Image (cartoon, helix red, strand yellow):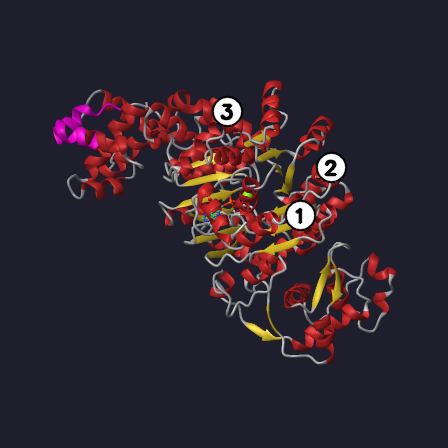
Amino acid sequence: MTDTELYAALKHYFGFSSFKGLQEDVVKSILTNHNTFVIMPTGGGKSLCYQLPALIKDGTAIVVSPLIALMKNQVDSLRSLSSEEGIAHVLNSSLNKSEIRQVKSDIENGVTKLLYVAPESLTKEEYIDFFQSQKISFVAIDEAHCISEWGHDFRPEYRNLRKIIQRLGDGIPIIGLTATATPKVQEDILKNLGIQDANTFKASFNRPNLYYEIRPKTKNVDADITRFVKKNEGKSGIIYCLARKRVEELAQTLQVNGIKAVPYHAGLDSKTRVKHQDMFLKEDVDVVVATIAFGMGIDKPDVRFVIHNDIPKSIESYYQETGRAGRDGGEGHCLAFYSYKDIEKLEKFMSGKPVAEQEIGHALLQEVVAFAETSISRRKFILHYFGEEFDNETGEGGDMDDNMRHPKKQHEATQNAKKLLEIVSKTNQQYKAKEIVNVLVGKTNALIKSHRTDSQPFFGSGDEHESKYWMALLRQLLVAGYIRKDIETYGVIKMTKAGKEFIENPSTFMMTEDHSFKEANDDAIVSQKKAGDAADQDLYRLLKAERKKVADKKDLPPFVIFQDPSLEDMALKYPITMDELSNVHGVGESKAKKFGQPFLALIERYVEENDIIRPDDFVVKSTGSNSALKLYIIQNVDRKLPLDTIADGKGLDMNEFIKEMEAIVYSGTKLNIDYWLEDILDEDQQEEIHDYFLEAETDKIDVAMEEFDGEYEEEELRLYRIKFISEVAN
Ligand code: ADP
Ligand code: MG
């Protein structure tokens, strides 16, 4: 096939006049029946690499792909390229007998150019028999990293692919494609598919337009995320959380804060999921809060930020998920919140798994820790992880991360670098990072003892620095290429040639110390402490969301239901009965009855789920002397006495008196002061203020004052608000 014909086919089927990146070379490799291996980042255009050759070549190409949803997408878009419905098919367990017959006949008649199958369907004998009698142009394995247990998405079904393909016929070319692969995973793919001879095409993993940032995760993470999103109002963003529950909560928090956000996770029914995904694509909402179930196959080019509420379990996951930002080459801010506690949580998740899997999971997690805590170029770190050299001085996007924009001070560490490398070599290259650091600071453990390393003269020779310092130095020596991690042995540190040379003839080595997220964590908590922090912030957030829900249902502003201080008090006292609720600040008996039920239910559930020990002597709010005054006010307002007369009767000034009335109506007792308001505000004015409070975000008087810009006195607004709360809320 000539180039002209190839370009004509590209134009004919896909409407493109040029190839993207390495596509042309890949297509040619497949067209000439070579085993081929393609590593291209997400969005790089891998599909076309095998789809175009499949459309051109005789016979049917089999495409193995792990996700049924993705297969359907691909088949749909292929069908749209052609007048022939049967040009592409899916073969999986969801088909009925007559559909299967149709697929087979389309293949026999040479109509079908691409057949998508799940790996488990490919193992079925009846299909294997059938394929043996057909012309198979090649087999493409999409998401080929699934074949390696060192990838982040290992699928045992991928393991037998090689054997099955061999049974399909002789000399069928195999094409592997993946978006993420460390050198170790690449090696596994080639080996397990038996295609060590493959033409390999690897695109750079550098995404120069993405900005990487890691921040400490404190208990104020909600506020941090909300603030970030607000600053980026109107831009599309994805927020990833580990747990479904957290997805729901965070989405609600954002909604309550006026951000157009929807949740997305596998626990939602498929209709809702599709709806939320559509809303995001059509920009009816700006933000999707999601588990990692979201994003596979999503092709929204202008996602401007990706936030990780929880740090992912591997660098591969982090890279893939952040990779959904800035696909159009425009701005893409990748912000992750990190706390070591989350790492411990992830380790706990793994504890039930087979030992080898745990070791791998642990090794992958340690890379994440190193990435989060490093103070060197994050881009350099990521690319090093994927086996790519990057010079952050000259490379594209070299300054696009927090560490490069706000660099920590560097200091010379040539002698210490030499000392560390010597220890690696003197201990026979048999230790992982942790043991090497232990030997330096003079900490022993069973393994070190068993080698008698703790009686060596160099044991503890670096005890003038803490472990953290040596760990940082070790990681930087890794990235600099003086040592390497041996993957097969789960991370034992080996010398490289450059490392050996360094010991002989050291060149200046500059290091920066790692971030100390633990300290940052505590600082942030202390400095951001505010009133009301004694309250359970998680519960407070849930209560706020509940209030929003109730308010929406009743078509009322939230503050009419309960005021913020009341919610705060609930989050402190955990009331679960009506009685207890009516003793919460600002909540009276009638208000408790009217609105309390869903809040009590929520608190009860929360207390149970989180094993919270409630104050068993639930403090009963004192009513005492105050209640006599309240009774006096209620009775006299009832008698329609002038307000100033009522106030005078108890020696209160107007401000104090209004405050008492506010306390009365906010806790759920009606006060009818219409007779007084009629004299100070005319009908139109009353209507205007009424409409304002009905629509307002808050019932705060200073906000209302600002809105009306001097049109009303503060006293007038406060008095009207008493009427409003009385009528609407009670
Ligand atoms: P990957 O599988 O590598 O993540 P896709 O195959 O889904 O990427 O392609 C990503 C996007 O790039 C798609 O929207 C596709 O239409 C587009 N694309 C692929 N090849 C070309 C090309 N040669 N010219 C223009 N756009 C292309
Ligand atoms: Mg793809």
Judge whether residue 233 can be spotted in this image. yes
Amino acid type at circle 1 is: Gly
Determine the CA span between mark 2 and mark 1: 22 Å
Q: Observer-nearest residue: 636 or 463? A: 463
Q: Secondary structure at mark 2?
A: helix
Judge whether residue 623 can be spotted in this image. no
Amino acid type at circle 3 is: Ala
Viewed as shown, does residue 523 lie left or right of 652?
right
The residue that disc 1 covers is 151
- Residue 164's tag is 2
Determine the CA span between mark 3 and mark 2: 56 Å
Q: Position of residue 201 (x, y in %)?
A: 60, 55
Mark 2 is surrounded, within 10 Å at the Cα level, by few (under 14), some (14 to 19) or many (20 or more) other residues, namely some
Q: Give the extent of the magenta segment.
A: 671-690
Locate residue 595: give its quadrant: top left
Q: Position of residue 629 (x, y in %)?
A: 31, 29
Give the answer, above or below, for where 499 lies relative to 242: below
Q: Observer-nearest residue: 401 or 565? A: 401
Front position among marks 2 and 1: 2
The residue that disc 3 covers is 601
Give the answer, above or below, for where 687 lies relative to 340: above
Q: CB of mark 3 within 8 Å of CB of mark 2?
A: no
